[in-house]
Amino acid sequence: MAELHEVEYVVLTAGAFDMLLEVVVEDDEHLLELLNAKIRKIEGVQTTETSSTCGSTKRRTSGGRLRRRGPVTPDQAVMADYEVAAGEPS
């Protein structure tokens, strides 16, 4: 999933989901295309849950700041959780 152009951030989690992705899309239509044509077709993906972000006040990772490919407005930033089957490579 990290190879997808729209994916900006990927972490493995120990919570309700196995993986958390942040993706940047142009609009709702682009989001639906990404989910239906790409992410949901990846072997091992069982469910997806998507939430839109309203903005960001702080952003830091252990490796430094995240870099975007270009300017992003709050309506373009989408946070999405993806649950993958246990033991399945993503």
Image (cartoon, grey):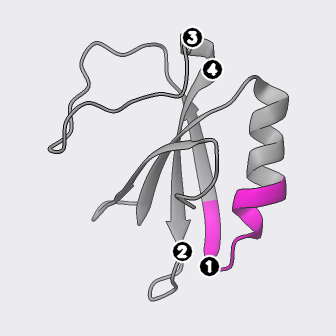
Contact between labelled residues 1 and 2, with CB atoms less than 8 Å apart: yes
Q: Going by the picture, which residue comes out furthest to the left?
A: 62
Q: Label 3's element?
A: loop
Q: Is residue 17 visible?
A: no
Counting residues from the N terminus, which is met first, the one under dot 2 or under dot 1?
1
Amino acid type at circle 4 is Gln
Q: Which percent across, then down, holds residue 41?
A: 77, 68
In the shown orientation, is residue 9 left or right of residue 74? left
Quick check: 22 above or below 4?
A: above
Q: Nearer the viewer, mark 2 or mark 1?
A: 2
Contact between labelled residues 4 and 1, with CB atoms less than 8 Å apart: no
Q: Give the magenta-colored segment's residue range.
A: 37-47
Amino acid type at circle 1 is Gly
Quick check: 4 above or below 12?
A: above
Which residue, given by chain and number where applicable, does mark 1 sit on? 44
Counting residues from the N terminus, which is met first, the one under dot 3 or under dot 2?
3
Quick check: 42 above or below 11?
A: below
Q: Which percent across, then down, holds residue 52?
A: 56, 26
Contact between labelled residues 3 and 4, with CB atoms less than 8 Å apart: yes
